[in-house]
Amino acid sequence: LSDRDGKIWMDGQMVDWRDAKIHVLTHTLHYGCGAFEGVRAYETADGTAIFRLQEHTQRLFNSAKILRMPMPFSQEEINEAQRAVVRENNLQSCYLRPLVWIGSEKLGVSPKGNRIHVMVAAWAWGAYLGEEGMKRGIRVKTSSYTRHHVNITMTQAKTVSNYTNSILANMEALDDGYDEALLLDASGFVSEGAGENIFVVKDGRIYTPDLSAGALNGITRNTVLHIAQDLGLELVQKRITRDEVYIADEAFFTGTAAEVTPIRELDRIQIGSGSRGPITEKVQSAFFDIVGGRNPKYAQWLTKV
Ligand code: PMP
């Protein structure tokens, strides 16, 4: 990914892709205190547009606030940087990665005295869990790793260090022949996927864990709350047990990268019919209409680049 043509926005300037480098003594590289976002831009009839740009930038600033990192740019500047990166790289649809990190002036746990840096990169990225998974559903394993407790690492911040837990869970799941991991919270209730929120469907109602289970307040999750309301489906946020997932009629993951991905199996137990369920399909299709600019009700969620 580092050896290609293009531009990356770094601390207020567009730099050549191959020159977007940092020093090995970068504080965040050693201690893991940093925050990032995952954002997508989609092709619409009106041109390329970034989906829920303001909400992603707001979450990035919230993450930095939680980590006590003063942001050296305004939200408007970071919004502009994201639009510019998509334009500069001539991308029709893409994934965007803003990152905030602590510089290399000094080491030691205390980051004081270090500069805070921001970068935004963008590149083309198709279905995160595979095209096939989008249609047929993916196979998921309940992780042997527990999701972060709400008072250990901060779970409403999208922090760099939170992802060690995600990486461990994802690697374990892949090594065991699954597509993705499902993590439980410290009390054993369903929290979220390694990089996705989870929803289950039972008797026509949709359920998702409430945020006290340590799940990230996903922007796609929030989009699905709107979609459910539009479809006249009741959506309940509550504690969910892993066996409620086993006996659900349908289940799906949501995320900026994962979009809306059906889950067909958990721990080798088939969920419902073992393929994409009808409600999942409706939610998925409504989601792609919104991000693709085909639902005027949500036009304000799309920022043209
Ligand atoms: N949970 C985790 C752990 C994630 O990494 C993500 C992806 N950002 C999500 C949930 C979904 O969040 P969003 O829909 O905002 O991308």
Image (spheres, rainbow, N blue to C red):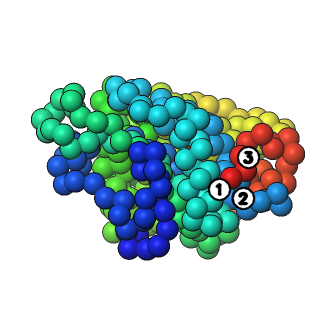
Q: Give the residue at x 83% y 61%.
A: 45
Q: Secondary structure at mark 2?
A: strand
Label 1, label 3: how far apart the Cα atoms are: 9 Å
Q: Is mark 2 within 8 Å of ligand 1?
A: no
For mark 1, does the 10 Å Cα neighbourhood hold few (<14), some (14 to 19), or many (20 or more) residues? many
Q: Secondary structure at mark 3?
A: strand
The quadrant of the rendering that contains the N terminus is bottom left
Can you identify the residue that label 2 sits on? 48
Label 1, label 2: how far apart the Cα atoms are: 7 Å
Q: Give, as a three-letter code, the residue at label 3.
A: Leu
Q: Give the residue at x 80% y 42%.
A: 298
33 to the left or right of 133? left
Can you identify the residue that label 3 sits on? 302
Q: Nearer the viewer, residue 88 or 274?
A: 88
Q: Give, as a three-letter code, the residue at label 1.
A: Ala
Q: Is residue 14 above or below residue 123?
A: above
**Precedes in sequence: disc 1 or disc 2:** 1
Q: Give the residue at x 21% y 30%.
A: 113
Is residue 214 in sight in this rendering?
no
Image location of residue 14, percent across then percent down: 47, 55
**Precedes in sequence: disc 3 or disc 2:** 2
Report if the CB atoms under discs 1 and 2 are less than 8 Å apart.
yes
Is residue 296 in sight in this rendering?
yes
